[in-house]
Image (spheres, rainbow, N blue to C red):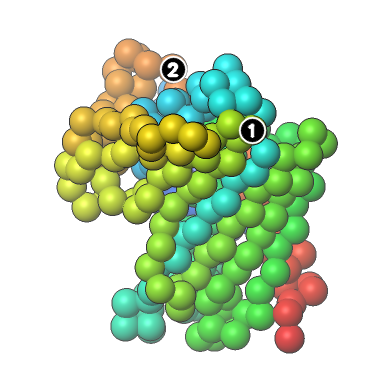
């Protein structure tokens, strides 16, 4: 809940900022950050570490060049059981942005943003908000695009561990299991491709660490060796994250 204030202070002090996701909690905090960023000089990067791995580019290419026909659906599961009930950290404190959707939903939105964009889709979310302190311990959200593409995510701190993306095309199903594995060290990530009447295929990537990739990206941006990640990308995600969350609270599942 302190991100916006301290991002702005750091930028105004001439400091480059790598900030943990989400960038901030509420849409109305974006103006404070953007005005500080507009002054020029320092760089700002939101720490969505998965965006810095080539499996995202590979999937985006599959979608854009229609390698397997049209993309029909995207199913995402981000279920990570709470350690010690998260009783000693912000995830169980509503006033600090607690709950699973604000913690995990940003990964889903960034994934959709990279693959198919967020513009034009209709979003909705549901939760009973029955976790500690009234936080959402399980949260479901859906997106429907004008071309018929449907995307859905299940976020949870109470369901058994499962973190995966499954993309269903006309002619194939492509899946990435244990999609946070490279958080833990240098691990190989694998896309599994199943086509009717064919043996399963794989697209494998050499062992990488998400956080090392992210830091390398941040350093290259600071040194002028790479273009900054546009602020509008994070702002678009925050607006949707806040909108989906607030609409779910207003129509909470009893």
User: Is 227 on the left or on the right of 88, as rendered?
Assistant: right
Looking at the image, is 85 positioned above or below residue 67?
A: below
Q: Mark 1 or mark 2: which is in front? A: 1
Residue 55: x, y in percent? 38, 32
Name the residue nearer the viewer: 193 or 94: 193
Mark 1 nearby-residue class (10 Å; few <14, some 14–19, many ≥20): some
Residue found 60% across the figure and 35% down from its top: 169
Tell me the number on the disc at residue 227: 2
Residue 66: x, y in percent? 60, 21
Residue found 41% across the figure and 44% down from its top: 176
Quarter of the C terminus within the rendering: bottom right
Residue 89: x, y in percent? 37, 75
Q: Residue furthest top?
A: 225
CA–CA distance between discs 1 and 2? 35 Å
Name the residue nearer the viewer: 89 or 121: 121
- The numbered mark, 1 or 2, whose residue comes first in the sequence reads 1
Q: Secondary structure at mark 2?
A: loop
Residue 82: x, y in percent? 38, 76
User: Is 85 on the left or on the right of 232, as rendered?
Assistant: left
Tell me the number on the disc at residue 170: 1
Name the residue nearer the viewer: 181 or 252: 181
Looking at the image, is 85 positioned above or below residue 48?
A: below
User: Is 51 on the left or on the right of 25, as rendered?
Assistant: left
Name the residue nearer the viewer: 142 or 243: 142
Residue found 19% across the figure and 36% down from its top: 207
Q: Secondary structure at mark 1?
A: loop
């Amino acid at each position: 809940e302190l991100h916006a204030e301290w991002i702005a202070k750091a930028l105004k002090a001439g400091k480059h900022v790598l900030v943990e996701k989400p960038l901030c909690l509420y849409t109305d905090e974006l103006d404070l950050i953007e005005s500080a960023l507009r002054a020029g000089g320092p760089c700002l990067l939101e720490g969505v570490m998965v965006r810095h791995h080539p499996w995202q580019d590979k999937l985006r290419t599959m979608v854009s060049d229609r390698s397997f026909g049209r993309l029909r659906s995207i199913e995402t599961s981000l279920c990570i059981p709470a350690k010690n009930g998260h009783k000693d950290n912000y995830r169980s404190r509503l006033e600090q942005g607690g709950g699973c959707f604000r913690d995990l939903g940003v990964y889903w939105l960034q994934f959709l943003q990279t693959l198919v964009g967020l513009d034009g889709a209709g979003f909705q979310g549901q939760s009973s908000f029955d976790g500690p302190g009234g936080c959402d311990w399980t949260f479901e959200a859906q997106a429907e695009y004008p071309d018929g593409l449907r995307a859905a995510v299940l976020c949870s701190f109470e369901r058994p561990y499962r973190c995966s993306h499954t993309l269903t095309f006309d002619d194939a199903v492509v899946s990435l299991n244990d999609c946070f594995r490279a958080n833990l060290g240098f691990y190989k990530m694998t896309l599994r491709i199943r086509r009717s009447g064919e043996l399963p295929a794989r697209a494998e990537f050499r062992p990488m660490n998400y956080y090392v990739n992210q830091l390398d990206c941040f350093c290259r941006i600071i040194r002028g060796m790479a273009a900054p990640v546009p602020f509008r990308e994070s702002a678009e995600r925050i607006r949707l994250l806040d909108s989906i969350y607030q609409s779910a609270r207003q129509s909470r599942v009893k």
